Amino acid sequence: MAGQGSGGNVIAAICNIFFPGLGQLVQGRILAALIFAILFFGGAALWFLIVPAIIAGIVYIWAIIDAAKYKGP
């Protein structure tokens, strides 16, 4: 990737809109992708408890921003 603001980061952020963690996977960050996906889907599955649903929403936004601001090694 060329760095923050590159076309690859935009594509990764868009991928995260459809599936949290997919953008990190596109960037080659497997561990980050797994963590975002597990946190989001775990919280979304427990939506009826309110607090996990709020955490899932925060993780969803965080995953998008993280993919968009990734600078690479």
Image (spheres, rainbow, N blue to C red):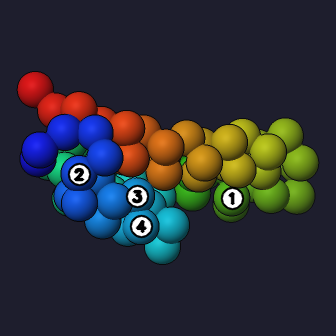
Residue at the spot of label 4: 14
- The answer to whether any part of residue 38 appears in the image is no
Question: Is 64 displayed left or right of 70 in the figure?
Answer: right
What's the distance in space between the residues labelled 4 and 1, CA to CA?
Answer: 20 Å
Residue type at tag 4: Ile
Residue at the spot of label 2: 6
Vertical order, 58 against 41 (above or below) = above
Give neighbour class at mark 3: few <14, some 14-19, many 20+ (Cα, 10 Å).
Answer: many
What's the distance in space between the residues labelled 4 and 3, CA to CA?
Answer: 4 Å
Question: Is 16 displayed left or right of 25 in the figure?
Answer: right
What's the distance in space between the residues labelled 1 and 3, CA to CA?
Answer: 20 Å
CB-based contact (under 8 Å), mark 2 and mark 3 = no
CB-based contact (under 8 Å), mark 1 and mark 2 = no
Q: Which mark lies nearer to you, 1 or 3?
A: 3
Element assignment for label 2 = loop
Q: Which mark lies nearer to you, 1 or 2?
A: 2
Residue drawn where x is 68% and y is 60% of the image: 45
In-front residue for pair 3/58? 3
Residue drawn where x is 68% and y is 58% of the image: 44
CB-based contact (under 8 Å), mark 4 and mark 2 = no
Q: Which mark lies nearer to you, 2 or 3?
A: 2
Element assignment for label 3 = helix
Residue type at tag 3: Ala
Numbered mark located on residue 13 in the image: 3
CB-based contact (under 8 Å), mark 4 and mark 3 = yes
Percent of width and height locating residue 57? 70, 50
Question: Is 43 displayed left or right of 33 in the figure?
Answer: right
Quarter of the figure with the C terminus: top left
Pick whichever of labels 2 and 3 is earlier in the sequence. Answer: 2
Pick whichever of labels 4 and 1 is earlier in the sequence. Answer: 4
Vertical order, 72 against 62 (above or below) = above
Numbered mark located on residue 44 in the image: 1
